[in-house]
Amino acid sequence: MCRACVVAVAVVVLAALSAVPGTAGAQKWYEKAVKKVDAKFVPAEAKPGETVTFALTVELNEGYYTYPTAQPDPGAAGMVNVLKVPKPGAAIFVGAVSDGKVQTKAEPELGIKELRYIPGTATYAHKVVVSPKAAPGPTTVKLTEFALSVCDKSNCFPPKKVPVEAVLKVLNAPAVPVEKAFAEEVKKALGE
């Protein structure tokens, strides 16, 4: 086979592979679009029973945007990021996730009157109660799933599952009463 023919075949094969989901080429959008995905607890240390915030920040490069975890318009229901919290342990996730600052636009050609999206940096916040039964010391909390959806002006890319974890230090102190707003959720999580 001629050298030019081999190069041509190689180019066609590489192009075909980059279009197949699950291959390295299919995820190149992530490296181009995402600067950083980071999670932390605020504050990073707390007594058993105290409420902290799990903050997940997604920083995108210029020209890219992402989505909240819920859309009010049924036509946009699939245009979300999936954030699944772990089962109760030292950290008990309570209430609903907050999507931070979202922008809205209409997408009439898709039948969407209100599409929520987040350009630049997205910060998702979720309240967490430190279990009144938590042992003192650092504990690593991993999300069960974070599926990130990103678009640019021309394309929306297949969601990518991104591992997310943060460390929470449980202070060696007596448990404090759980906030009234979350007391029932915590009791249920602890099986009380």
Image: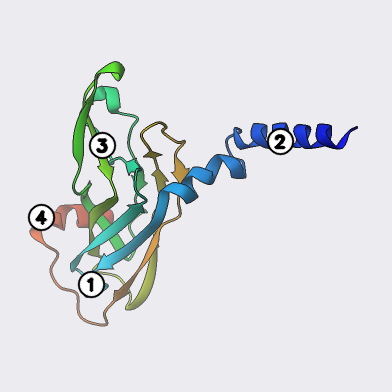
For the point 41% across and 33% down, which residue is it? 156
Residue tagged by mark 3? 70
Q: Spatial distance from mark 2 to mark 4, Cα to Cα?
A: 59 Å
Spot occupied by residue 91 in the image (x, y as percentages of width and height): 30, 63
Left or right of 140, for residue 113: left
> Which residue is at the front of the view, 105 or 144?
105
Query: Label 4 to label 3, Cα distance in Å?
Result: 22 Å
The answer for how far apart the CA atoms under marks 3 and 1 are is 31 Å
* Residue on which the image places disc 1: 48
| Image marks 2 and 4: residues in contact by CB distance under 8 Å | no
Q: Position of residue 64 (x, y in %)?
A: 35, 43
Between disc 4 and disc 3, whose residue precedes?
3
Residue 131: x %, y % from top left: 26, 66
Along the line of sight, the residue nearer the viewer: 185 or 126 = 126
Left/right of residue 87 with respect to residue 178 in the rendered view:
right
Question: Which element is circle 4 on?
Answer: helix
Give the structural element (helix, strand or loop) at label 2.
helix
CA–CA distance between discs 3 and 2?
Answer: 40 Å
